Amino acid sequence: MKTLSSLVSRLSSLKVTVFLLVAFLLVIFWGVLGQANAEAAGMPASVAVERFFGSYFVWVFDVVPVPAMKSLAVLACVNLVAAMIFRMPRGLKFAGLYGIHIALLVLLAGSLVGGALQQDYNGYKNVAPESVPEKSGTLTMFPAGDSLGTVAVQFPLETAGWTYHVEYRGRFPMSPKSSIDLYTVTYDPMRFVPYAFMSLMLVSLVFHYVVVVVRARKGDS
């Protein structure tokens, strides 16, 4: 138990935080460069996005595993929690600092959970050629990876809300009397995470500035 506590305590180190920040920057640079190379080679940029940002490891030369964005996010979550437990000062006046760390934790953990739960669909709806696209009716959807169209899902457009993002992609004529409207639908129950992060971060920064910085200046004067 002491060994585990000692390990977690070491992970709270500011050196680990700096190392993770540098690693994040390198992976982002590497990933953007990978997207450019993929497009130059005639491949979709999503291949590089999945390799660097949607996986836990990048395999260099198909032999050496290098931590990718998800692994760094997990380590950063551990570092944030450990810092709040072992490194940060106690007291109500430091609540802003805790709020900042919690906001970052919400962003990182939310992105990991959201990435695991997110599902993309391609959908269509039969319509009359002269009709106007509406946010009603039922879509027949297939998971984006289901190229054979074997798993159909019926989705009422009226239920599209926070967890489902629907995007109209255009109309494709089938016959003089029939057309289909094409849609993409993204299921993402963690879409609120960026808004929660920004709100909590702003409140925490303001609190920390008012309680710690302003009071310290008044004390010096």
Image: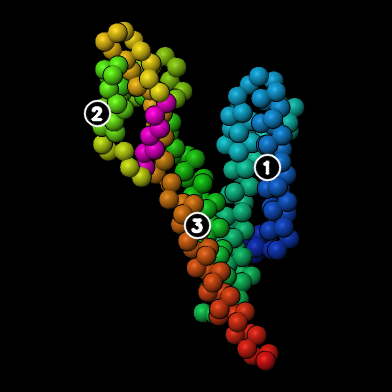
Majority secondary structure of the magenta segment?
Answer: strand
Q: In which quarter of the view is residue 33 placed?
A: top right
Residue 87 position (above or below residue 142): below
Q: Residue at x 50, y 57 (%)?
A: 197
Q: Can residue 154 be seen here?
A: no
| Mark earlier in primary sequence (3, 1) | 1
- The residue that disc 1 covers is 28
Between disc 2 and disc 3, the foreground one is: 2
Q: Residue at x 69, y 20 (%)?
A: 41
Q: In the visual, does 221 lie left or right of 78?
A: right
- The residue that disc 2 covers is 137
Q: In which quarter of the view is residue 35 placed?
A: top right
Work out which residue is located at the far front of the displayed protein and give it: 130
- The residue that disc 3 covers is 197
Disc 2: CA contacts within 10 A as few (<14), some (14-19) or many (>=20) = few
Distance from Cα at disc 3 to Cα at disc 1: 20 Å
Front-lying residue, 146 or 157: 157
Badge 2 element: loop
Q: Position of residue 27 (x, y in %)?
A: 69, 42
Q: Position of residue 101 (x, y in %)?
A: 56, 63
Q: Quadrant of the C terminus?
A: bottom right
Please state which amino acid type lies under the numbered disc 3. Answer: Phe
> Is residue 27 a member of the stretch shown in magenta?
no
Badge 1 element: helix
Q: Residue at x 69, y 53 (%)?
A: 21
| Mark earlier in primary sequence (2, 3) | 2
Badge 3 element: helix
Q: Which mark is residue 145?
A: none
Q: In the visual, does 71 lie left or right of 170?
A: right
Region rendered in magenta: 163-169
Distance from Cα at disc 2 to Cα at disc 1: 41 Å
